[in-house]
Image (tube, grey):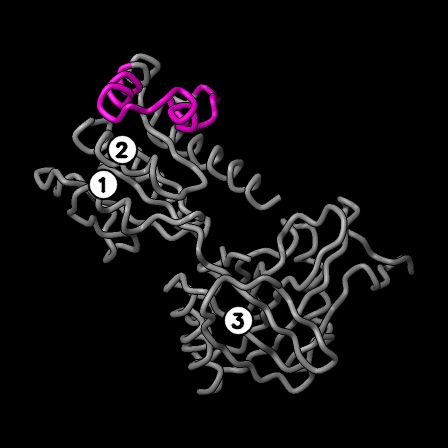
Amino acid sequence: MQLTDLTVLQQLNRWLQAGEDVWLCSVVSTYGSAPRPVGSLFATNGSQRVGSISGGCLEQAFFEKLIAGEFADSAQLFDYNSQLNRSGRPSELPCGGSIQLLVERLQATSINRQHAMLWLQLAESFQPFERSVGLGHGGATLITLASAPVSEVVLTTAMVTLRYAQVWSIVILGISAVSEHVARLALMAGYRVRLCDNREEMAESWNFNASEGGIDVEWADPAQFVERHTTARSAVLALAHDPRVDDVGLMAAFNCPNFYLGALGSQATTRNRRARLQRICQLDDATLDTLHAPIGLDIGSKTPVEIAISIMADLILAKSKVLV
């Protein structure tokens, strides 16, 4: 599974560093129409909340149980569908699904602060890792994995292990207003994002650097950049709207593994690009048809942020088909 809750881990660290105890919920399993995937996180310091475990319909019920003192153990499993609501009937989500949670009470000890900091570092490194938590007594360990895990969760009577793949990535070609919005959305969605450009005169146009929580531009040849950083879990997005960047990167991308390949531009731009790639690279129509161009879902988007939303929606759709 992919960890998409970096903001939860960041806030978790802030609370622990400030000396506040935290209750952390991890989705361990779901059944039916549960709205949040396994691995999703929700945390509270008893007053503020961050993250989500059910899209909003369970958080308040959990908070009420917390205030009532039902989560005093360091770590326990909590099956929402097996609980009784105020009328005495089994609770269930409005969508009809059920959720099993790992609930941890993390006191602001030096061990927990160090653990949370290491967890955030592993998550931000986008490398596969697993986190094991002892039931009852708590205590957690983190280890990196050599490759993406096959199983996401391992449950025993004494331990819960959650495994995160963290290998989905987006390779962006070219600085543009759309690139910036795509990068912002992709980072929030848990993707690893890389951006390259070979037009160093565009450096002042990029306003989402790593120092501001974004990514730095890698000044490189687009073809070499694509060859170096794409895998079967990568999306390659040509967003420069400049053939000097887009075409060069696309020529390499057609020969590299990826789950999504797209290029920005109008219908006319797309026809001209296809003609160039066919002439220069001798690509056939079937190969060119794998390119999503014009990029994104056709939702009538006009502004850079609307276009970025349409791109991310189309990319997520493509990824879901890979996961089936």
Residue ranking furthest to the top: 268
**Residue 69 position within the rendered picture, expressed as x and y whole percent measured from the top left:** 72, 76
| Residue 134 position by quadrant | bottom right
SS at badge 1: helix
Q: Nearer the viewer, residue 236 or 58?
A: 236
Magenta residue span: 272-300
Q: Nearer the viewer, residue 150 or 123?
A: 150
- The residue type indicated by label 1 comes to Ala
Say whether marks 3 and 1 touch (CB < 8 Å): no
Distance (Cα) linking label 1 and label 2: 7 Å
Residue assigned mark 3: 130
Magenta stretch: includes residue 281 = yes
Q: Nearer the viewer, residue 163 or 210?
A: 163
**Residue 145 position within the rendered picture, expressed as x and y whole percent measured from the top left:** 47, 70
Residue assigned mark 2: 251
The answer to whether residue 2 is seen in the rendering is yes
**Residue 63 position within the rendered picture, expressed as x and y whole percent measured from the top left:** 67, 64
Query: Alpha-carbon neighbours of circle 1 within 10 Å: few (<14), some, or many (≥20)?
Result: some
Query: Alpha-carbon neighbours of circle 2 within 10 Å: few (<14), some, or many (≥20)?
Result: some
Distance (Cα) linking label 3 and label 2: 37 Å
SS at badge 2: helix
- The residue type indicated by label 3 comes to Glu
**Residue 132 position within the rendered picture, expressed as x and y whole percent measured from the top left:** 58, 77
Distance (Cα) linking label 3 and label 1: 34 Å
Residue assigned mark 1: 223
Say whether marks 1 and 2 touch (CB < 8 Å): yes
**Of callouts 3 and 2, the N-terminal one:** 3
Q: How many dots with numbers?
A: 3
- The residue type indicated by label 2 comes to Met
